[in-house]
Amino acid sequence: MVESKSEGIPFYIVDVFAEYKYSGNQLAVVIAGDMLTDDEMQRIAKEMNYSETTFITSIENATTRIFTPNVELPFAGHPTIGTAFVLQQEFMKGKAKTMSINLKIGQIPILFKYKGDFLAETWMEHKEPTFNGYFAPDLVADVLGIRESDIDGRFKIQGVSTGVPTIIVPLKSLDALKRIQINKEKYESLIENTQAKTILVFCPETYDKNNDLNVRFFADYYGVPEDPATGSANGCLAAYLVKHEYFGKKVIDIRVEQGYEIGRESLLLLKAEEKSGKYFIAVGGKVILVAKGILF
């Protein structure tokens, strides 16, 4: 930990939900301490131009703030997992199995899974989901630039939140998912009077036969036109899949691919279960250190 700005501020770049380097979702993790103002953190996040940048304000308490290039978020998935990875690898001694990341939304439990001495997977537990209103298929199809018939009518389009409210849209095919082109004017109209500002679409067809679903995620409201891997929205998806029994039961243990359409192949692992109205939701995956350095 540096003592002053003049000594430089350490930062790390990691790929989250990545099977290999330069895949997954990029993240910058900055060891900010109390040396940066809110405005400086926002400016650094814009300079980094990643989907999110995290600032660790207390290593001891794992206190973290998350910024997109445009705004601060109370919670986001891949920054939470990426920050936990950096803290475990760089500052914790021994093979810690658990920790908590302290965010504006509250504490998020983290689980580390090892293969021998190697940290293989980092998992985070989501808060209890809330299920919001339903959305008309024709309106959502217009926003996505696809046909209403591309939407899987067996399941409703619904807003779900485990921290970041997201509109979950089930599609029939990979072809429909590939054809999506967001109509910004209609997107802005759709989200204007809704709590959810982001859209996650998914389908059962995949590029990799070992995976269960393909996902795309759009969050232009937060300055992220399309995210290559999103732990928060996939937590919402996990809750949706269980609630609507998408796989025919109220429990899932699946592999989700994301980012293929934008050249950042990602793999997220989802586990969820509902019992007596209570949900357990966990999202996990691999994290890879790409670089570390000093901000001046």
Image (cartoon, rainbow, N blue to C red):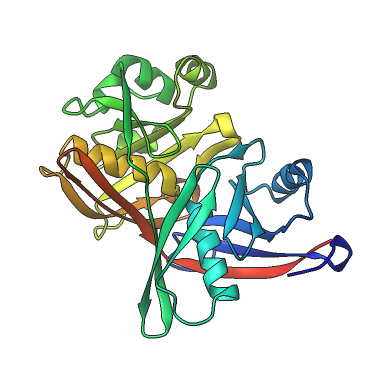
Percent position of residue 281, x then y: 30, 49
Q: Which quarter of the figure is the N terminus placed in? A: bottom right
Q: Can residue 144 be seen in this view?
A: yes
Q: Residue at x 55, y 43 (%)?
A: 104
Label count reads 0
Q: In which quarter of the image is residue 9?
A: bottom right
Percent position of residue 206, x then y: 28, 50
150 lies left or right of 55: left
285 lies left or right of 221: left
Q: Can residue 228 be seen in this view?
A: no
Is 202 in front, or is 232?
A: 232
Q: Residue at x 35, y 52 (%)?
A: 257
- Asked if residue 231 is positioned above or below residue 148 in the image, the reply reads below
57 lies left or right of 273: right
- Asked if residue 47 is positioned above or below residue 20 in the image, the reply reads above
Percent position of residue 144, x then y: 41, 25
Q: Residue at x 74, y 42 (%)?
A: 38
Is 16 in front, or is 56?
A: 56
Q: Which quarter of the figure is the C terminus placed in? A: bottom right
272 lies left or right of 105: left
Is 147 in front, or is 78?
A: 78
- Asked if residue 289 is positioned above or below residue 64 in the image, the reply reads below
